[in-house]
Amino acid sequence: MKLSDFDFDLPDDLIATRPATPRTSARLLHAEGGIRDANVFDLPNILRPGDLLVLNNTKVIPARLTGQRARESAQGPVTAKIEVTLLSPTPTGDWTALIKPLRKVAEGEQISFDAGLAATLIAKQDGQGVLSFNLSGGAFDTALAAAGAMPLPPYIEAKRKADAQDRVDYQTVFAKEQGAVAAPTASLHFDQDLLAKIAAKGVDFAEVTLHVGAGTFLPVKVDDITQHKMHAEWGAVSSEAAARINATRAAGGRVIPVGTTALRLIESAAATDGTMQPWQGDTDIFITPGYQFRVTQGLMTNFHLPKSTLMMLVSALMGAERVRDIYAHAIAKRYRFFSYGDSSLLIP
C-alpha cells in the first residue's frame, strides 16, 4: 500500500489545543457495526461485563528544557539560547536529546538550565545529542520537575507553548512509571470516577507500561510504506497483566487496549495463538493492513494524523475503507482531533 492511501483533508480548526473539561466530557465515536455518537462518560453503558481495558501507566516527564551555552571569547563570555528535548535514557545513565541549534554546542561544552541543572554534550549522532547531567536519581527528577516543561506534540507547540495547566492535562490519572516524552493520549479522557463506574459494570483492567517516545510524531517519508523504519520504544508486561489478559480471553471477554501504545505492546508480547506472557524490552512493531491481530479485539483511540503510522494501525484493525468512513463522519460532525482531541471506540 502507498502512503497516499492513508491521507485525508483535515480542517485546521479541528486540531485541539486544549482538552475537553472535564476529561470525561470528550466526545466518543463508537464504531461497532454502525457508527454512533457518544461521550467518553458513556463507556460504562457501552462496554460489556467481562471486557478488559488495557491501560498504559507510563508517566510523562517534563522533558523540554531551555538553557544557555556559555563560551569564552576574546571579548568575554558569549552565550547562546539552547532548546533541549529529552528523548530516552541510555544504559549508562546519560540522555539522548534533540538539541536546537545543535551546531551551536560543541562536544564537551556545558548547557546550564534552571534549578541547578546542567548537562555536558558528550556526543553527536544522527542529528541528536547525548547529554551527561550533573545530577542523578531523585535530585535529577526534582530539578527536572522545576526546570522542565511538558513536551507537547509539534502540532500543539506550533500554536502555543506549554504552560502549568499542561502538567495536569498531559498526564493520565493512573500514570506511575516515569519515562515517557509523549502521553498515551486516549487515556487522558479517564478520571477516577469513570474508572470506578466502569469497574462497577464488571469490566476489568490490566496495566502495562510503554514509554512513549518522540518517535511517535515522526512522519513517514517513503511512499512505499513497507520501506518505513519504525521507531523503537521500551515496554513491559507484568505477570499480573498477562494473567488478567489470558483470563479474560479464556472467559470469552474482549481485550480492548486504551491507546495504540498499549495495543502495540500487547501485540509484541503475545504468542502467535494470543497467549500472553510476561515481557519486557524494546518494541518496533509496525502494524499495517494485513496484520493478523493476536490478542486485540477492539481499541479506544483518539483521531490520528494523516499519513501516519497510527492511521495504518487503525486501518489494519478496522479495514482501510471502514476507517475512511469513520474519519469522514468525524470531520463532518466536527470531532476534535489529535492528542487533546476527542476519542473513538473501534470494535472490528
Image (spheres, rainbow, N blue to C red):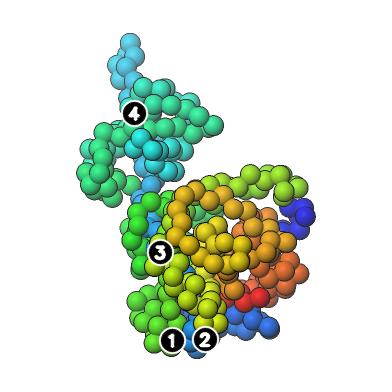
Task: Tell me the CA gap for discs 1 and 4.
Answer: 52 Å
Which circle's residue, 3 or 2, is located before the other in the chain?
2
Q: Residue furthest top?
A: 74
- 255, 22: nearer the viewer: 255
The quadrant in which the N terminus is found is bottom right
The amino acid type, in three-letter code, at marker 3 is: Ser
Q: Which residue is mark 2?
A: 48
| Residue 187 visible, this orientation | no
Quadrant in the picture for the C terminus: bottom right
Task: Find the distance from the CA under tag 1 to the CA under tag 2.
Answer: 7 Å
In terms of secondary structure, where does tag 3 sit? helix
Mark closer to the chain start, 2 or 4 = 2
Dot 2, how many residues are within 10 Å of its Cα: few (below 14), some (14-19), or many (20+)? Answer: some
Residue 190 location, quadrant: bottom left
Residue 332, placed above or below residue 113: below
Image x and y of residue 313, in percent: 64, 61
Say which amino acid is labelled 2: Arg
Residue 89 shows up from this direction = yes
At a point 39% along the width and 45% down the height, the residue shown is 64
> Mark 3 vs mark 4: which is more N-terminal?
4
Nearer-N-terminus badge (3/1) = 1
Using the numbered discs, state the Cα–Cα distance from disc 3 to disc 2 in whole angstroms: 24 Å
Q: Quadrant of residue 65?
A: top left
Residue 68: percent from left, percent from top: 34, 32
Q: Identify the mark nearer the N-term, 1 or 4.
A: 4
Q: Amino acid at mark 4?
A: Thr
| Label 3 packing within 10 angstroms: few (<14), some (14-19), many (20+) | few
> Which one is in front in this view, the residue at disc 3 or the one at disc 2?
3
Q: Are marks 1 and 4 in contact (CB under 8 Å)?
A: no
* Label annotation for residue 120: 4
